Amino acid sequence: MKPTSLNQTARFKMPTGILGTSVSDDGTSLVAACMDGIYLVDPRNESSEKIGQHGSSAAFLPEREPSVKIISAKTGEIQHSLPHVPSVQAVAFSPDGQFVAAGNLMGEVRVWNAHSAELAASFTTPDFTSWGIIKSHCYLGGIFALEFTPDGKELLLAGMGPMRDPMAGNGRQLWQKWAWTEPEPRMIDETHKGESGEGLMETLAVHPDGQQFVMGGRLRGGDWNATMFDLAFGARIATLKTGFRVTEAIFTLDGHQLILVGAQGQPKTMVDGVFPDFGQIEVYDVAV
């Protein structure tokens, strides 16, 4: 297990919260999907340019299911429609593009062949879902992030451990690793005892070298909300307390940098007709 250090090289605001991001192959620019539009970001000089605007419309659709659809990036055509209920909150493709996995509100994971749409595996973990018995009498939680391991044989899941009051968001910061290709899928590791606080985890990213992964999200209690773990042994090897909700973590292609994006609160008061900037981007050099 290699020691790891994360050294912050950039931290800057965006106009609104960031829901997702993609990094260029050379690591010099980002595309950030913010609440108010799409931005092209240069983290080197902490600048951004708005390049797209979200549309807003509403319509009744005749089909509510299937809830997972594989769409051609070239043509926009739906190639497969895959059933999965209730709400699907996380999807991931295997590194070779052969399989697609989806996790839902009730902790059920389904894995399909992305080409034939044949169901390859299905398993359920109850550890990410809570039945509220204090304030909300309903199921809350679920799987919020999924990632295949580099060999495609295992799946990482992230979310929050169970609690009596799900609205409080004080469940354990939780990841699990499952061997999904076995005849009976089984959990082989999870967040180790004493290595987590409280909060909903919303993103996973596997380092390009295949030896570490990062999990991030919201902090309810504890000393970190983004952490790097050893992929083989599950041990915590580096921690960050960012002070904002991390909605996505992503590594540059060469693995030399980790980029965290998200939102720092949500302003309730406008200044001169504009909300103060509350989107957040942080860039870290990764030394492994």
Image (tube, rainbow, N blue to C red):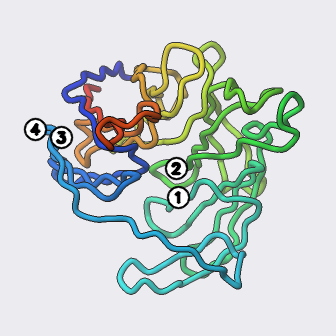
Looking at the figure, which quarter contains the C terminus?
A: top left
**Residue under the point 67% across and 25% down:** 172
Amino acid type, label 1: Ala
Q: CA distance from mark 2 to mark 1?
A: 6 Å
Secondary structure of residue under mark 4: loop
Q: Which residue is mark 3?
A: 43
Residue 45 image label:
4
Q: Earlier in the sequence, mark 2 or mark 1?
A: 1
Question: In the drawing, does residue 174 fall left or right of residue 39?
Answer: right
Report the front residue among 112 and 86: 86
Secondary structure of residue under mark 1: strand
Q: Earlier in the sequence, mark 4 or mark 1?
A: 4
Secondary structure of residue under mark 2: strand
Secondary structure of residue under mark 3: loop
Residue 149 spot, x, y in % from top left: 50, 48
Residue 147 image label:
2
CB under 8 Å between discs 3 and 4: yes
Nearer the observer, disc 4 or disc 1?
Answer: 4
**Residue under the point 28% across and 65% down:** 52
Q: CA distance from mark 2 to mark 3?
A: 25 Å
Question: In the drawing, does residue 236 fall left or right of residue 191?
Answer: left
CB under 8 Å between discs 2 and 1: yes
